[in-house]
Amino acid sequence: MTDVRLPVSADGGVLHTLFRSEQGGHEQVVLCQDRASGLRAVIAIHDTALGPALGGTRFHAYASEDEAVLDALNLSRGMSYKNALAGLDHGGGKAVIIGDPELIKTEELLLAYGRFVASLGGRYVTACDVGTYVADMDIVARANRWTTGRSPENGGAGDSSVLTAFGVFQGMRASAQHLWGDPTLRGRKVGVAGVGKVGHHLVEHLLQDGAEVVITDVRAESIERVRSRHPQVTVAADTGTLIRTEGLDLYAPCALGGALNDETVPALTAKVVCGAANNQLAHPGVEKDLADRGILYAPDYVVNAGGVIQVADELHGFDFDRCKTKAAKIFDTTLAIFARAKEDGIPPAAAADRLAEQRMADARRS
């Protein structure tokens, strides 16, 4: 098992991002390799001003190692902002494991990854993310004590996607309140791209609230799970078709990041974007493009914080009702961000960043 630190370099790629203050500023990045199990992973710690870095482990078949490192950098930075606005005493961190989880995920590999988490001595607390599940965290936790998102049988809180979806729904309600003067999606047409771990729970909230729902997903089994329970839900062929759906009021990206980009933003028919996916803005400037088109954007790291609220609570003895109460405050936080954006004449994403950066800066000074 080796622990390889990123060297200082004049390279214009991932190392440039790491050391460039406006997008980087990360405290530590660890490259992890265990040849026996086939583990290749990246653990990125962005900021610990508010406390130990907290963020999930993504297991994904990246096209390259550079892409994996960049994803870890972007995701960990986003966790710093998410944890700050969620009111948690945690900084931001994230890990990615490189490879197709359906092909290479083994107990040996997860234990090797857990040993790397342990080597950081509590600077990074891990949890589930895309490609990892509660059962995986139970295995990782056998190798270290800084693992959350475990099963109730193993002292954990279980599936965090339930409260993630609940928090996103609160963000949707706040968006409806801000734009239409009523905190409900009743009678609104909502498109959900990605109905996996979080998305299918979100669909339940929307239907209970009286929304008309259109879904899409690359996995046929995910669509079938929703349709078997709710045959009234409409299916779009793909995301491109979904975002162009006539009469769409709200678009919820709930799959991987980069959903809002130079191609998708001009094609959006929805008046609101509010979803569970991390890092929805493909690059700086997209938030202004949305504002210029009159599309209200609820910052992803604000509305999808329900899951991290849950896993953080697990560290202190999990109480679901206490967590749900905290997650319900996402409604008020989202409204406050919209108000700040209007007051400062900036997009909501910029307003959210300012509020998060202020909390982190205050912590560094204290």
Image (spheres, rainbow, N blue to C red):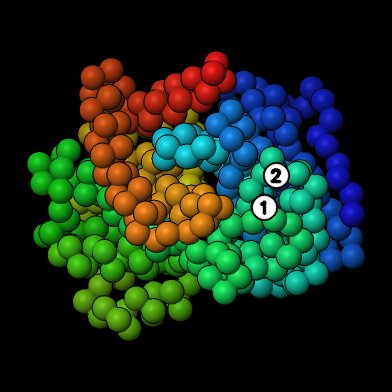
User: Is residue 79 positioned above or below 148 on the image?
Assistant: above
Q: What amino acid does circle 1 point to?
A: Trp
- 207 to the left or right of 242: left
- 38 to the left or right of 186: right
Name the residue tied to disc 2: 122
Is residue 168 at all visible to an observer of this figure? Answer: no
User: What residue appears at the point 34 percent right and 76 percent down from the top-left corner?
Assistant: 226
On residue 316, the disc is: none
User: What residue appears at the point 35 percent right and 48 percent down from the top-left corner?
Assistant: 326
- 19 to the left or right of 193: right
User: Is residue 303 positioned above or below 28 on the image?
Assistant: below
Circles 2 and 1 in contact, beta carbons < 8 Å: yes
User: What residue appears at the point 76 percent right and 43 percent down from the top-left corner?
Assistant: 120
Q: What amino acid does circle 2 point to?
A: Gly
Residue 38, percent from left and from top: 83, 63
Q: Which quadrant of the figure contains the C terminus?
A: top right
Q: Nearer the viewer, residue 52 or 335?
A: 52
Asked where in the image residue 358 lies, by quadrant, the reply is: top left
Q: Nearer the viewer, residue 11 or 360?
A: 360
Q: What is the secondary structure assignment of the residue under circle 2? A: loop
Name the residue tied to disc 1: 146
Residue 319, percent from left and from top: 42, 59
Q: What is the secondary structure assignment of the residue under circle 1? A: loop
